[in-house]
Amino acid sequence: MSSTAESAPSSAAVAPQPGAPAPGVHPDLSAVPRIDFLLLALAVGGVALSAPLISAIAAPAVAIAFWRNCIATGVLAPIALLRHRGELRAMTKRTVRLSLAAGAFLALHFAMWLPSLRLTSVATSTALCTATPLWTTLYLRLRGHRPPRVVWVGIGLAFAGVVLLTGFDLTMSSRAVLGDLLALGAGMAASGYFLLGSEVRRTVSTTAYTFVCYATTGLLLLVACLLSGQTLTGYSPTAWGQIALLTASAQFLGHSLSNRVVRTLGPSFVSTAILLETPGAALIAAVWLGQLPPVAVYPAVAMILAGLLLIIRAGQRS
């Protein structure tokens, strides 16, 4: 989540926020302070930077995910344990179980998405992983929710883009196809993370929830690193600096600021803006890493983003 898994408030899964517009009610954007639009731009920039950064870090992919969550948990720990100690103790068994499950889904997301960036292009991996609203909508349909007809148009368009993108990679190499499949799986895992987290945040603050969730994610990723033999130390100072930058830009800047502005801009507007992560990441990868995807990739990515846009906008209106 890509960083999207941590920062994009899915209109289908986001919980009500204090002071946020009610579901289905579009906020008056002309009355929103300009600073909120700037904060949203910083959030999008933060998540867009993560994929190119991960590709550039000279360290094992899952180990990067572990340290990212470990650092985030360490920063949150004093705040959660001092200011939210009572709330943590008051969490019901159900909310604890849901938080632990959300952390497991987030660990699965990271364990698939970060390796995918080493197998396929940043643009392709990010586009496929960003398809979280697609899987969320399909899951809710299985649970009895009936989305508007335009949502099915969006689903069809996004699926067509996915088929086109993976079909093109199939002609390139099996390595790229494996990266595509991992990115798709990461998006599915992020959908589970969103749905479980939105349920917990109905009664639990973001700080208390993310502390339990990130700690769970970090622990599971540590086990994965130990079982797979991935090196956790001995990186260069540059690599450590990049991991710290990754944590700050995606885990805190993207996550915190998007949750801050969703209260005034609304989940639909923020979710739509977060879709800019894909072209933003592709642009950064092209300029910084010299990674230019083939021309055939762009129409497929555009189809995926257009389909997701229809899903998000129609889902919010419904």
Image (cartoon, rainbow, N blue to C red):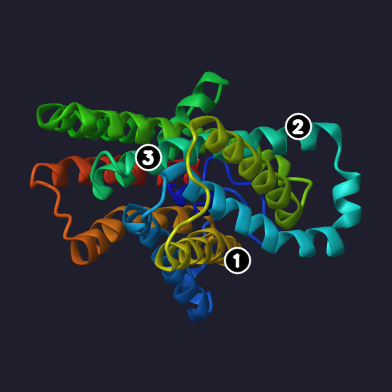
Q: Can I make out residue 67 in this image?
A: yes
In this rendering, the label closer to the viewer, 1 or 2: 2
Would residue 205 be found to the left or right of residue 55 on screen? right
Q: Kindly identify the residue that appears in the image at 50 percent across and 23 percent down.
A: 141
Q: Secondary structure at mark 3?
A: helix
Q: Amino acid at mark 2?
A: Arg
The mark found on residue 97 in the picture is 2
Taking depth in this image into account, of 119 and 235 the one nearest to the observer is: 235
Q: Amino acid at mark 3?
A: Pro
Q: Amino acid at mark 1?
A: Arg
Mark 1 in CB contact with mark 2 (< 8 angstroms): no
Neighbor class of circle 3 (other Cα within 10 Å; few <14, some 14-19, many 20+) is: many
In this rendering, the label closer to the viewer, 3 or 2: 3
Residue 297: percent from left, percent from top: 15, 43
Residue 243: percent from left, percent from top: 47, 61
Q: Kindly identify the residue that appears in the image at 54 percent across and 58 percent down.
A: 251
Going from N to C along the chain, the mark reached first, 1 or 3, is 3
**Which residue in the protein does label 3 denote?**
115
Q: Can I make out residue 21 in this image?
A: no
Extreme-front residue of the structure: 234
The mark found on residue 168 in the picture is none
Would residue 141 be found to the left or right of residue 197 on screen? left
